[in-house]
Image (cartoon, rainbow, N blue to C red):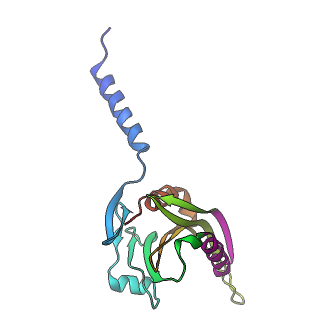
Amino acid sequence: MKTNPLFSRLAALLLVLTLASFAGPKLTKTAITKTLTVGVPAGFMALPDDGIAAKYPAARRPLAVYSDPAGRIDFSVAQKPTTFTDRDYALLLKIYKASIQNMYSKVQFLTEDIRTVNKRDFVTLEFVSSVNDTRRGSNLAPIRKYQLVQYAIQGDQLFVFTFDAPADEQAQWQPTAQAVMKSIVMK
């Protein structure tokens, strides 16, 4: 029995597309420091220093921030001194969870644990947050965000990896956020 060449080509194309759909989000391996690399989502661009300063006005700015072309979704890496050690992760999980709960009007935690990624432990908090406008007479809707945050200690430094997106786009960005966090390599 002969098979139709068009049918064979379509079947092969379907197989390739099916396999590609299971491959996960496309990430570009990016060096943040000499000892830190991470997969940045395809299409995300590094913000220049003045862009970081404008978007993250703080005394201690992130090491790097990558945004989607619309500037709505961000992945950032921050570093700051700490007196904690990697043996304090259970305590840090409780501290950062409480801090997040105090920072927002409402928080729904999706994940709160200590994970090993590429032979390194991370405190992991994944959540959807809401901030209500509490000014008198305000009718503004709450601002809702999906966030995946990982913390790691290396020496006397705490590294904070944050992926955030609008909560209504969580289903679209959650697999990418998880892939980014699984791609972190600290030497």
| Segment colored magenta | 90-110
> Would residue 26 be counted in the magenta stretch?
no
Q: Is residue 50 above or below residue 152?
A: below
Q: Residue furthest right?
A: 136
Quadrant (top left, top right, bottom left, bottom right) of the C terminus: bottom left
Tell me where residue 97 appears, x and y as whole percent: 64, 73
Residue 37 sits in quarter: bottom left
Q: Residue at x 56, y 65 (%)?
A: 124
Position of residue 76 in the picture relative to residue 87 (left or right): left
Magenta segment's dominant SS is helix
Between 126 and 123, the residue placed more toward the observer is: 123
Residue positioned 54% across, 60% down in the render:
115
Percent across and percent down for residue 63 are 38, 79
Image quarter hosting the N terminus? top left
- What residue is rendered at 68% in x and 85% in y? 138
Task: Please say whether residue 75 is visible from this viewpoint.
Answer: yes
Does residue 113 lie above or below 159 as drawn? above
Corner quadrant of residue 106: bottom right
Residue plotted at (44% across, 70% down): 75
Q: Position of residue 20 (x, y in %)?
A: 38, 42
Nearer to the camera, 131 or 89: 89
